[in-house]
Image (cartoon, coloured by chain):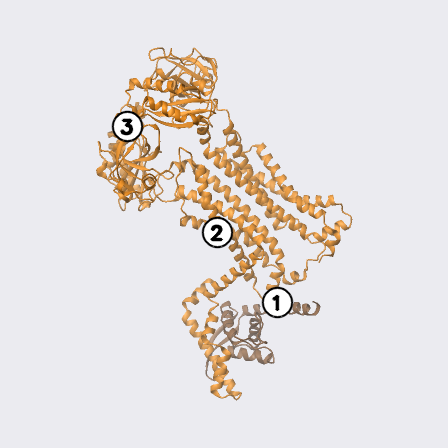
Amino acid sequence: MSRHKNDILQGTLVLLVLKTLDAQGRMHGYAITSHIQRVSADLLRVEEGSLYPALHRMSQEGWLRAEWGTTEKNREAKFYTITAVGRKQLETEEASWTRLRLGVTRVLRYA
Amino acid sequence: MSWFSRLRNQFRENAVSKEISKEMQFHLSEKVDDLIGAGMPPAAARREARRRFGSLAYQTERTRERDLIGWFDTATADIRYALRSLRSAPAFAAVAILSLGLGIGANTAIFSLINAVMLKSLPVSHPEELVAIHRGEGSVLTNPLWEAIRDRQDTFSGVLAFGSTDFNLTAGGEARRIDANWVSGDYFATLGVRPIAGRLIAKADDYRGCPGTVVLSDAFWQSRYSGDPAVVGKSIALDGHAFEIIGVADPRFFGVSVGEHPQAFVPICSEAIIRGTNSQLDHRSSWYLQLIGRPKPGLTREQINARFATIAPGILEATIPSNWPADALKEYRRMVFSVLPAATGFSDVRVAYGKALYVLMAIVGVVLLIACANVANLLLARAAARQREMAVRLALGAGRGRLARQLITESLLLAALGAALGLIFAWWGSHVLVRLLSRSDRVLSLDLGIDERVLLFTIGVTTVTGLLFGLVPAWRAGRVDPQAAMKAQGRGVAEGHRRFSMGKALVVAQVALSLVLIVGAGLLLGSWRKLATLDPGFRRDQILLIDADIRGAATPPELRLALHEQMLTALRALPGVRSASASQITPIATSTWNDLIRTDGFTPKSDEDAVVWANAVSDRYFATMGIPMLGGRDFDNRDTQTSAHVAIVNEAMAKKFFSTPAAVGRRFQKEVGGNWTAPIEVVGVVGTTKYQSLRDSAQPIMYFPRAQESAVAQYVSFELRTSGLPIGIVPNATKAIAALSPRITLDFTTLDRRMAESLTLMRTIATLSGFFGALAVLLATIGLYGIMTYNVARRRNEIGVRIALGAERGRVVRMVLGEVSRVVIAGTLIGVGLSLGVTRLVASFLYGVTPTDFVTLGASVALLAAVGVAAAALPAWRASRLDPVAALREE
C-alpha cells in the first residue's frame, strides 16, 4: 500500500483518537477521521486501515467504551466514548509526545 | 491484553469479524456519501472509497492481529530481533551460551542418571501395578519361602521370584563371566515381556528336576550370535553344564534390577544342575530370591498386607529352618510380609549411588546458579550499553512492558540456546559418567535414553534459568528515564557509582558459591587421596590375585586340599614368581568371613564386640603379601588336621582381646554352629591390615592354617608376588593350572587394581566435584574480570582526572584492587559461613578429614583470593597505564 507523506506517525494515532474523543465526547469512527483531518487543516490524514484496528485494541485495553447506535442518517454505527482509564492514558501519551517533540526539536536545532 | 480476552476473541472470532466488517461497511457508506456530496458520480465515488480503504478482508485480518495469532507474530518478531541483537554481540553471546550450556548440560546429565537409576519405570507392561514383597526390613527370601508364598497366596494375578548370579562360559582356564538371573516360571508372564525369538521361560519349565533351559538377552544374542535366529534350540555351556537356548527376550527388557543387565535367564529349578549336591533349593536359610507380584484388579496394598498377615503363620511354619537357635527361630516366626510399589524395580545401584547422585545434583545446581549470575552480570553490563537504545524506543512510544518482554525474550532465547548445547553435553556427559562409575567386575548398565521427564526437567531448568538472569535487567530497563538517558552522552567526569551495585552483588554471590564448591571438592579430593595412598598394612604392588573354581574338576572333598597344594606348588614354580600363597579370602573383596570368639580376660560389650574377621591361609601368606611378622611363627607343615589347632592374629586383635601385642601362647575359642571349639593357641602376631574396605579402621583379624579347616571349599585364591608386571604371569599360570586339570576356571586381577576399583565411586565424586569446583572458580573469575573491566572503563574519565591531578600509578592500582578485595572478602565471608553449614552433607564420603577441616577451608580461601587478584590484575594495570590526555579528550 502506498503511503501518504502526511500519514500519522506510528504511535501518535492513539494520542489523537484519545484527544479527539476527550474533547468531542461520543463519536463514531468516520467522525473521528473527519475531525482529525479538519482540525489539523488537512495536514494529518488518518489512514482508515489503521484506525479500526487501533479502535479495537483501545477498547480491549479499556481506554474506550464502544456501543452500537444509529446516526442521524439512520445508519447503524459503532460509537466510542473515552473512559477514565483512557483519560489517564491520554495524559501519559501527551507527556511522552511532548518529550519526543522537545527531543526531536533539539536534535534538529543543535545537532 | 490478557490471555483470557485473547482466548475469548478466538472463540468469538466470527462475532468479532462480523462486527468489524459491519463497522467498516458503515465507514465506507459515509465516505461514499461525502464524495457524492463533493460532486463525484456515485459509481466513481464507491470505487474511490473502496480504493482508499483497501480490501475489507485485509482490514479484518489487520484487526485480528491484536488477537492470539498477533501475539505469536510479535513473539516471532521478538525472537528475530533477539537473534539479531545476539549476532551483533558474538563474544557476549558465545560466553553466555557456553556457560549456560555447561550449567544446563551438567544438570541434565546428572538428572538423566538420577532418572535412570531412581525414577524410570521398568520396561514391562503396566509397571505401576507391580509391588515388591518385603519381609520386615529386607526383601531377600529363601526358595522354600518363595514356594510357600507362591502356593498359598491368592491376592496376585501373577507373582514372580528372581535372584542374581553369574555364569562362566568357559569350561576351564580363564573364566568369562556373564551376569544372569534365576527366574521363576511365571517371571516373564507376570511382567508381560515378549520374546523376539523363540519363546520365554514358562511355568512348565520350572519344576524340580527340570532340564537346563535358558533365555538370552538381546544384547548377548547380538554380541555372541550376531542375532542369528537359528541359535534357538542350540545348547550353551553355563558353568560347564549344557543349557538349551529356548528364546531371546525383548531388546528393551533388562530384568527388574536397575543398573544390572543379566545376559541369561534360567529357571530357578536349574540351580540343582549348576550346584549339584550343594543345591540350595531346599535350604531354609539361603537367602537369594526377591519377589514381585501383580495384584488382582481392585486390591489395595492394605488389603494385600492384611491377607499376608493371615497366611504368614502357615508359610513360616512350613519353612522353619531346622538348625537355628531358639531365639532366632522366635524371630523367624515373627516375620511380617508387606508389599511396596515396585514400578521402578529393585536396585542395588540405587542404594550404592543414590546419595552420591544427589550430592552431584546439588553441586551442578550450584554451578548453574554461578553461570546464571555470570550471564545476569553480562546482561547488566550490556543493558547499560543499550540504555540509549531503550530510551529511544521508550520515547517513540514503546510500552515499558513491551521493552521488558523483549529483554525477557532475549534471556529465554539465550537460555534455550544454552539448553540445546547443554543437551549435547548431557548426552555425552551421562555416558562418560556411567563409564566412570563402572568397574571391570561390575559394569553399570543404565537406560540413559532422554525421556519426557528429562526433557521436562531441562525445559524447566532452562526457563527458570532464563527468568533468573533475565528478570533483573528487564526490570531495570523498564525504569530507564528516557530524557536522562538521552542527555547522558557518557561524558560525566566522575561517574556516580554506588558502593554496592547489582553487578557487584552478583559477583559476591558467585565468589561465595564457588568457595562452597571448592571447599567441598577439596574435602572430597583430600579424602580420596588419603584413601588411595594410605598404607593398607600389606604391599599392594606386584601382586597377582587368582580366584580358582575347582568344581569342574569334580574332586572328592578329601582330595581338594591336596589339589589346592598342587596348584600352589605349580604356581610357585613359575618363572617371575618370587613368592606365592593360597588363602580363602583376599583383601578388599566382596566375600568376607567372621566368627564370634571368646577368651579369658575379655568381656565383650555385645555379641558384635566379640566378632572377629577371619581367613584361612597357607604358609608364606604374610611374606607374599608383605605383612610384617611381629612375633611368633608362620604356619608350616607342623600344622595338620590332627595337630593342636593354632591361629595367627593381627596386632589389633592381640591388643583388643589379650591387651598386649605379645599374644603368642595365649588361647581363645571360636563359635562353630552354636558350640565353642577347643582352645586355639596363638602362634604368631602380624601387622594390622585392611580387611574388606580401605575405610576400615584397625580391625581385629585372625588367620587359621588351611590344613586345619574342617571343610575345604571348591573355591580358593592365590596371591603371587611377581618380579615383573603381575599381569605378565597370566598365560603361564593358566597353562600350569590347566596341566593339573583343564576344568578348573580362573579369574585374574591385581591387588593394585582391586584396591583402585574399590574407590571407583569415591574417585568419581571427587574428580567430578574437583572439575565442577574448577568450573565454578573459572566462571567466578570471568565474572570478576568482567565487572572490573567494566568498572574501569566506566570510570575512565575519573581515573584520567586523578592521574592528571598527580595520583601515582600505584595508587590507581591500589584503588582498583581495593574494589576487588571488598567484593572477594564479602563473598568469602558468606562462602565460609555457607561451607560450614553444608559440607556435612558429604560427611559420609569423607575419610580422614572433618567437614569443617580448617586446612581445606584456608586453602580454598587462599585460592579464591589469588584468583581474585589475578582477575583484577589486568584491569588494574590498564587503569594505571591510562593516558590522562587521551582519556579526557575522548568523547
* Chain B, hue in figure: orange
In the rendered image of this protein, does residue B333 appear above or below residue B383? above
Element under disc 1: helix
Q: Which numbered dot is residue B526?
A: none
Q: Is residue B213 left or right of residue B782?
A: left
Element under disc 3: helix
* Chain A, hue in figure: brown
Q: Which residue is mark 1?
A: A96
Q: Which numbered dot is residue B420?
A: 2
In front: B753, or B452? B753
Residue at position x 57%, y 56% from top?
B475
Q: Position of residue B852 (x, y in %)?
A: 55, 33
Q: Which residue is mark 3?
A: B275
In this rendering, which labeled residue sits more in front, label 3 or label 1?
Answer: 3
Classify mark 3: residues with Cα within 10 Å, few (<14), some (14-19) or many (20+): few
The quadrant the C terminus of chain B occupies is bottom right
Q: Position of residue B778 (x, y in %)?
A: 58, 43
Q: Is residue B729 visible?
A: yes
Classify mark 1: residues with Cα within 10 Å, few (<14), some (14-19) or many (20+): some
| Same chain for the residues under marks 3 and 2 in the image | yes
Residue type, mark 3 in image: Arg
User: CA–CA distance between discs 3 and 1?
Assistant: 92 Å
Q: Are marks 3 and 2 in contact (CB under 8 Å)?
A: no
Q: Is residue A18 left or right of residue B170?
A: right
In the rendered image of this protein, does residue A90 appear above or below residue B547? below
In this rendering, which labeled residue sits more in front, label 1 or label 2?
Answer: 2
Which numbered disc, 3 or 2, marks the residue that appears first in the sequence? 3
Chain ID at mark 3: B
Residue type, mark 2 in image: Ala
